[in-house]
Amino acid sequence: MILKRQGEETSEPLKAALYYVKRGIPVFPLHNLENGNCSCMNADCSKPAKHPRALYGIEDATVDENQIRTWWAQWPNANIGIPTGGITGLTAIEINSTEALSNVKTLCGEGYDFESVPRLRTGTGWQCIWKSDLPLKSCLSILDKVDSRGEGGYIVGAPIQDIDSQTYHWEVHLTEHVPNLPRQLRQLIFHHWKEREQQRIERCGGIQGVPETQRERLFQIVYRFRERDVPEAYVRRPILLPTKYGNPPFPEHEALEILRLVYEEYPPGNDLI
Ligand SMILES: [Zn+2]
């Protein structure tokens, strides 16, 4: 069974969700498979069975058992989202090959107690969970086939019923005792984030004629939509409002250029920056 410590008792998603919250780890409900399709009913769903059910996603995450019971009574098969970043203080390192796993272990240094690090076996590799006192962004490719998930991100907790596999399980359980992120990994994430941020600012600067703060703000707004996988067509109207009523008004063609850039450059979901 997936959460061996509690045996069969934790085989249902509700019981697994309660396992997490009883250890002070907030969770929120994700969509799940229904008859082989994502329960969101969108035939083109880009994250089947792995995107939030509730309105605000990670911001809904809670340790309130009543809320957990209410959600899983409403959606008994909902998969479980566990936020990374400030809400939990957790950072997940996603590792997608055995070689990458070995590289991460090497980076942690000889003698590092890797077996004390909560480790989730996923369909494609592993997710190792650490604590971080500092807010860390999500970054792609901090090493070959290694990504990090931090602020604004989440992981899918076991058990999971998804379209690719049903093999998610904790090789080392997630409990209230999570070791701190090793300094080497933290520095690597910072380094990648800074590089990425620099590139983003440079692209942003390519749009002339609008004060930087307004541009930056609009970028962030469009990111939020992209993060939540809102179709581009739906975003046009809300972002064009400041072009009319902003102070000073924002040139419409430049707002549309920001929209185009963000949707071209970044995949949907929580892997941004
Ligand atoms: Zn879906």
Image: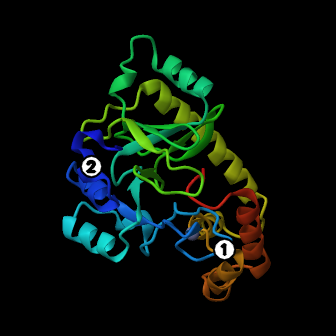
Q: Is residue 25 visible?
A: no
Q: Is residue 51 visible?
A: yes
Residue 238 on image: x %, y %: 62, 83
Location of ligand 1 given as a quarter of the image: bottom right
Q: Residues within 10 Å of mark 1 (few under 14, many from 20)?
A: few
- Above or below for 270 versus 74: above
Q: Which of marks 1 and 2 is nearer the N terminus?
A: 2
**Going 49% across and 21% down the picture, which residue do you hit?**
105
Q: Which mark is residue 8?
A: 2
Circle 1 residue: 43
Spatial CA distance of label 1 from label 2 is 34 Å
**Going 52% across and 63% down the picture, which residue do you hit?**
49
Please tell me in which quadrant of the rendered image residue 97 appears: top right
Please tell me in which quadrant of the rendered image residue 103 appears: top right
In the foreground, 230 or 136: 230
Element marked by disc 2: helix
Q: How crowded is mark 2: few (under 14 residues within 10 Å), some or many (20 or more)?
A: few
| Mark 1 lies within 8 Å of ligand 1 (Cβ measured) | no
